[in-house]
Image (tube, rainbow, N blue to C red):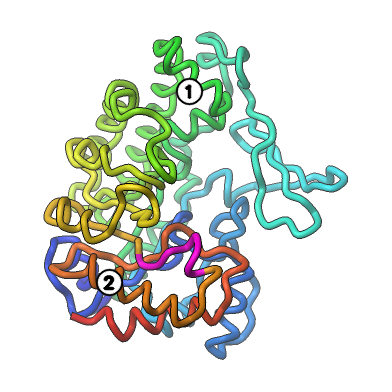
Amino acid sequence: MNARERLLTTLNFQEPDRVPFDMGSTQVTGINETAYRNLRQAYGLPEKEIIFSDQIQGLATLDEDFMQLVGIDTRGLFPLNSHNWNVNTADGGDYWLYHDEWGIDHRKPKEHGLYFSIYQEPLKNEKLTAEAIKNYPWPDFKDRVRIAGLKEAAEQHRANGYAVVIKDPFAGIFEMSQRICGMDYLLMLMASDPELAGMLFDKMKELKIDFFSTALQTLGDLVDVVCIMDDYGTQVSQIISPRMYRNQIKPRWKEVLACVKEHAPNAKRFLHSCGNVRPMVPDFLEIGIQILNPVHIRATGMDPAQLKKDFGENIVFWGGGVDTQGVLPMGTPDEVREDVKRNLEALMPGGGYVFNTIHNIQADVPVANIVAMIETLREYGVY
């Protein structure tokens, strides 16, 4: 069974030879450059220059020698976007500054800085008006330069027997809108002026359809998984109520997902949403989501065994392999092994499970813990 067959088997709720393993196929299932360097060294691999899949988050593109050594089944396609394309920084004193294609200003501390963070939204607060949305210089997601070389890469991955994953090139309808006008303002607007908020959501929907209708005309037959991202959960509940999600966000995603299905009918549709999203899982299923990531098992309501019991026949879980908030960065290798074994026991029976951490592996994670995670998956993730 090759890697692609393994993934497709589990995505169809059947047990393959072992649990498929993803690391680095998207900008939410990756690893920080520092942790990746340490991991290469731990496995006796030569040092290589880091190529970023996401320069804003500091995520490394994994090299083929490493992926083959540890048995990663997925290969990612990364459209050009504001996290990996034309990231031109300026000197801002104590910070590196970056003004992206959306008009968003980011900064990263020069001393011990690991990530760029947003410090100025372009249509902050009252700058967001119907006229501003209409006339704003939005990025062009029909531009085919964004997918230059991806067809050839996908064909090579497919020929080598790997599963091909493509990520949406910008954050979700809800999340990207926050980056345009500010999270606090958007949340108030959704309650006080849903029509104006809806105009911004409609623009995000339009840009996503622009991208998927363009990219998937070329790549639709070559990709196995199409990923979208939109965070709705907190550690204990949801950022917005399920009712507000259903009224204002869900119908727009339904249109985007219909576009994905039209152009890539055989690809599975993957949603990344952190935190407690349990009340929304039935809604995700209704609009065509087939895979849930990152399976935030430490959040309220996200117990992996209960999720598997309640939804495991209808949605694939991709992630939830180890607690990345406490155990992976701060536990011992033995504690990591126990956590991985416990989560595998909950999520892998019957297929419908892909192993990944809960979001990206951060720079401060001890390399011994990452090795313990990989080796435990190798030992116990066998059917």
Residue 195 in picture, x, y percent from top left: 40, 11
Residue 106 in picture, x, y percent from top left: 68, 40
Q: What predominant SS class does the magenta segment belong to?
A: loop
Residue 231 within the segment the image draws in magenta: no
Judge the density around disc 2: few (<14), some (14-19), many (≥20) Cα neighbours within 10 Å: many
- Which quadrant of the view contains residue 221? bottom left
Disc sitting over residue 187 in the figure: 1
Residue 323 within the segment the image draws in magenta: yes
- Which quadrant of the view contains residue 313? bottom left
Image point 55% across, 21% down: which residue? 185
- Which quadrant of the view contains residue 144? top left
Q: Which residue is mark 2?
A: 344
**Disc 1, disc 2: CB below 8 Å?**
no
Disc sitting over residue 215 in the figure: none
Image point 29% across, 56% down: which residue? 303
SS state under label 1: helix
User: In the image, what residue type sits under mark 2?
Assistant: Leu
**Which mark sits nearer the N-terminus, 1 or 2?**
1
Image point 33% across, 22% down: which residue? 248
User: In the image, what residue type sits under mark 1?
Assistant: Leu
Pick the residue in front: 210 or 364.
Answer: 364
Magenta segment: 321-328
In the displayed structure, does residue 153 sit left or right of residue 291?
A: right
Distance of mark 1 from mark 2, alpha carbons?
Answer: 37 Å
SS state under label 2: helix
- The answer to whether 114 is drawn above or below residue 67 in the figure is above
